[in-house]
Amino acid sequence: MENQKLPNATAVLVLGILSILTCICYGGGLLFGVIALVLAAKDMKAYRLAPENYDNYQNLNIGRILSIIGLVLSILMIIIFIWVISIIGMDALGNEDLARERLQDYLGQ
């Protein structure tokens, strides 16, 4: 009997890559990372029940690791955005001179 492929392994791998690529888009990788981890959990459960039936577990595992990295990077980017907004304020985001002035005040220059 030929081994079958895990149904979501490729999708998890692609979503894991997308979660890393979009982490700088205001934490957009958060969405891709969560979806990939949910799909990976389903396939890992199937793999644990009968590991001899599947042959692409490595793709699933790599995708899961990439998703975790993308989630961590997305969360860090969200924290950085919140920190920057707390320093310069929402009203200064569209005004470069005001943002520069508030940043210089924050740095004590």
Image (cartoon, rainbow, N blue to C red):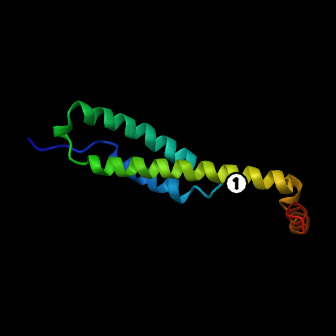
Q: Residue at x 44, y 44 (%)?
A: 36
Q: Residue at x 34, y 47 (%)?
A: 61
Quadrant in which residue 92 is drawn? bottom right
Residue sitting nearer the eye, 109 or 2: 109
Number of numbered discs present?
Answer: 1
Residue 43: in sight, yes or no? yes
Q: Residue at x 86, y 53 (%)?
A: 89
Q: Secondary structure at mark 1?
A: helix
Residue occupying the far left of the picture:
1
Residue under label 1: 80
* Left-right relation of 14 to 48: right
Residue 28 x %, y %: 60, 51
Q: Residue at x 85, y 53 (%)?
A: 90
Q: Quadrant of the C terminus?
A: bottom right
Quadrant in which residue 17 is drawn? bottom left
Residue 27: in sight, yes or no? no
Q: Amino acid at mark 1?
A: Ile
Q: Quadrant of the N terminus?
A: top left
Residue 23 x %, y %: 58, 55
Residue sitting nearer the eye, 102 or 7: 102
